[in-house]
Amino acid sequence: MGMTLTEKILAKASGRTKVEPGENIWVETDVLMTHDVCGPGTIGVFKREFGENAKVWNPDKIVLIPDHYIFTNDERANRNVDILRDFAQEQGIKYFYDITDRSDFKANPDYKGVCHIALAQEGHTRPGEVLFGTDSHTCNAGAFGQFATGIGNTDAAFIMGTGKLLIKVPATMRFVFNGELPDYLLAKDLILQIIGDISVAGANYRTMEFAGDTVERLTMEERMTLCNMVIEAGGKNGTVAPDKTTFDYVTSRTDKPFDSFYSDGDAKFYSDRTYDVSKLEPVVAKPHSPDNRDLARNCRDVKIDRVYIGSCTGGKTSDFLNAARILKGNQVKVPTYLVPATQKVYEDLFVTKYEGQTLSEIFLAAGCIEPAAPSCAACLGGPKDTFGRMNEPEICVSTTNRNFPGRMGNKEAQVYLASPYTAAASALTGHVTDPREFLC
C-alpha cells in the first residue's frame, strides 16, 4: 500500500520509510512561526520549562511576525510586540518582522503584515517541509505541498527548545475538483461548498488533500484560500500537490532546497469526494457558522450594513483584483473596508492595474474606504479601536474565514462569509448579492 502526500512528508520528518494514519511519531520541525498574540505565551512557557537563560534550538528556523493587534492604542497589545522584540534580540532570531512606528507602517521596512501571507511572500513556505505555527490558519501553507498546521503555545514552546514535536499521523480525505472554473466562482466558493457539505467537524484531525484539473489551474493565492479554511472543517492540515506553479512561486522567493512529494496511486484515503465545478454556484456561509452554507442568490433579501475585504483568506492581491473587476465604474452603497494582508499587497494596490486603472483608483472612485494598514485588523475583532471592527450589531459580508458570534467584534453582529466577487457585488447593492448580476 502506498502513502499520501502528507504521510510521505511525515515519514521523512520522522526518519522513517513509512507511516500510517493513527501512529504517534516524533517529527523534526523545519519552521516554527508565532505572532504577537500567542508569541508572548509561548515564550513564557519556553522560559519556564527550559530555563530563563535557555537558548532556542535553532534561531534561523523561528519566524516571529507581529500582525494581529498592531494598529491600536491598547497598551497590552503594544506590550506583546515588545516581548517579541526583546526575545528576538536575546535569541538572535533572524526572521523577526518588526514594527516600531505604528503611526506610519510604511516607515517600517521589516514589517510585513498577516503571518500566513507573509510566510509565503518571504519564502518560508516550501514543498516537503514541516511548518508549525501558533495560529489555526497555519494550514494556509499546505498550498505549497508541505505539512503545515496550527499548534498551541505549549507545543510551540517545546519546539523552541527541541525542534521536535510528537504528533499523530492524520488520515487523508481527498477532494477532487474537475472542469473549467466558471468566471463567477473563486476558490472561496469551493472551500465553502466543501465545509457546507461535511460540516465544521467533518474533517476533524484529518488531512484535506485538494486535487483535480480545476485545482491544477488555480494560482498559488487561490490554492492558499483553499488550504486556509481547512481548519474551519476541523482539518489538521490541507495539501495541494506541488507543480510548476508552486515551483515558480517558491524559487522566486528563496534559494533553499526542498523536496516534493505526491500521493501514490495506491495510497489509502479516508474518503473521496469529486465535484464538477460547472455545476457549482456562488455561495455564502450565513451566521453563525462556516458550514451554514446557502446560495448567494437565495440570500438576496438580506440587507447589509457593511462589506469587509481582507484577512489571510481574502486580503491577497488577487482577492482585491477580483473585487475590482466588479467595483470598477460602480458605486458602493454601504461602507466598504479594505485591509490588505501584507505591506506587499498594499503596495500592489497602487501599481496593479485593471483596465487601465490601479486597484486603489478603482476602489476610491467606487466610494470604498481608503485601504488600511496591513494587518489582521477586524478579522479577529481585536481592541475597540481596531480598523473595521464591528462595534455595533451590524450585518457584514466579509471575505474572512469565521463568522462565530463576536468573531469580528460585537457579539450580536452577523457575518456572511463570501468570496471577493460576492463581497464586492453585495457592496454595490446593499444586500447579499450573487456576483453573476455583474459578471454575466
Image (spheres, rainbow, N blue to C red):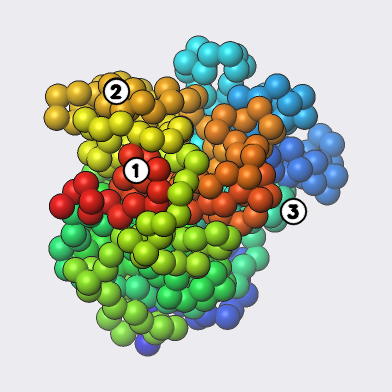
Query: Closer to the N terminus: mark 1 or mark 2?
Result: 2
Query: Closer to the N terminus: mark 1 or mark 3?
Result: 3
Circle 1 residue:
429
- Residue 364 in view here: yes
State the separation of the CA atoms marked 1 and 3.
47 Å
Judge by depth and name the residue closer to the eye, 148 or 363. 363
Callout 3: few (<14), some (14-19), or many (20+) C-alpha neighbours within 10 Å? Answer: some
In the image, 83: left or right of 96? right
Point out residue 155 in the picture as x, y percentages from the top left corner: 70, 56
The quarter of the rendered structure image containing the N terminus is bottom left
* Residue type pointed to by label 2: Ala
In the image, 150: left or right of 210? right
* Residue 360, image quadrant: top left
* Residue type pointed to by label 1: Thr
- Residue 162 in view here: no
The secondary element bearing badge 1 is classed as: helix
Q: Nearer the viewer, mark 2 or mark 3?
A: 2
Residue drawn at x 36%, y 26% is 367
In the image, which disc is placed on residue 365? Answer: 2
Query: Closer to the N terminus: mark 2 or mark 3?
Result: 3
